[in-house]
Structures are given as structure tokens and as C-alpha cells.
Image (cartoon, rainbow, N blue to C red):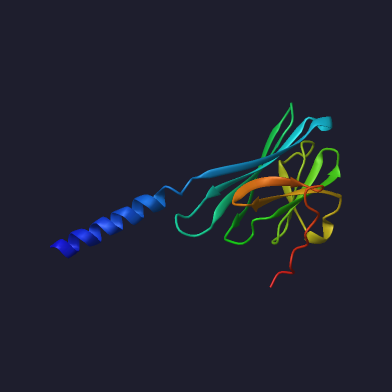
Amino acid sequence: MRRRTVRRLALATVTIAGTGCIGDLTVATTHVPDQQLALSVRREHAHWFLAEYKRTAILETPERHLSCVLPMDTGGTVRINVYRATPTRYILRDRFGALEIAPDRRADCGDLPVSAVSGTFVGAFDVVDGRWQFLTSSERGELAFAPPE
């Protein structure tokens, strides 16, 4: 009887502790004052035990609020490089692919082949010292992605 109670308590503790991570949300944002733009990437825990995240890119202007669902980070993807193709068109690139987000597009965003990534590197969304944040190109230079396996 006592063993069964201890097992149940242990299982309940793990379950309660684990479910606290699901839905935890972190957001990193960069502002482009000359264009009145804010570009953010939101990460939300998708699994209570594994380092898996649902990711959403958000571009805000005074006129529009764009939201693009990025491929799920199933662990190890973390960094997203950001390139400015035009003053209002941005390309987000991670190790799996690239996505374009721009307020003048009909749809909020569109997939791009990695070979089509062009523009000026402006920074990267990344985890540094355990914190999800945006690092400008002056804080850290562009880091290349390893070729997919």
C-alpha cells in the first residue's frame, strides 16, 4: 500500500511540474524606428519534457499586424537569422528554410527557397544566457547554418 502511494505521488509531482512548461511563452522583438516596424518571434513550449517550441513571426506596422506560423522547433533549431530585403520586406532564415514577411504582400508570409535569401543581415533571434532575444548585427555577426543532413 505504501509503495503504491509513493508511486502515485511521484507520478502526480512529475505530471504537475511538467504541465507547467506547456504554453510558456517567450517573445523577442526588434524595432525599426525609421520604418515604424516591429518584428517579433514568439516561442511557446509545445512539450512538457522535450525542448520543442511552436514559433510565430509577427510584423507590426501602424497599418497592419501580420502573423506567420514558423515550422516547429523540434530541438536545436533556435537561431533565426533576419535579413532586410527592402525597407519593409524581411526574410527569416533558420536551419530548415526561409520565410518572407512583408506588410505589402497579399498574404502575410511566404516560403522561400534558401537560395533566394538575399538582403542585408540585420541580426538574429537566439537564446543567449538562457534568454530568448534579438541580437543586432553589431552585437553578433552573421552565423552560417550547417548544411542539412
At 47% from the left edge and 55% from the top edge, which residue is drawn? 47
User: Residue 142 placed where, x, y %?
Assistant: 80, 56
Residue 29's spot in the image, x, y percent?
Answer: 68, 39
Q: Quadrant of residue 52?
A: bottom right
Residue beneath the point at 40% across and 53% down = 18
Q: Report whether 13 appears left or right of 67.
A: left
**How many numbered marks have been drawn onto this rendered protein structure?**
0
Tell whether 113 sits left or right of 14.
right
Q: Which residue does the image show at 79% across and 44% down from the upper left?
A: 90
> Looking at this rendering, what residue extends furthest in the left direction?
1
**Quarter of the image holding residue 89?**
top right
Residue 110 rendering spot, x and y as whole percentages: 73, 49
Image quadrant where one finds the C terminus: bottom right
Report the residue that reaches farthest toward the top. Answer: 62
Task: Out of 17 and 57, give the one closest to the viewer.
Answer: 17
The picture places residue 119, in percent across and down from the top left corner, at: 86, 50
Quarter of the figure with the N terminus = bottom left
The residue most toward the front is 129
Residue name at image x 35 percent, y 56 percent: 14
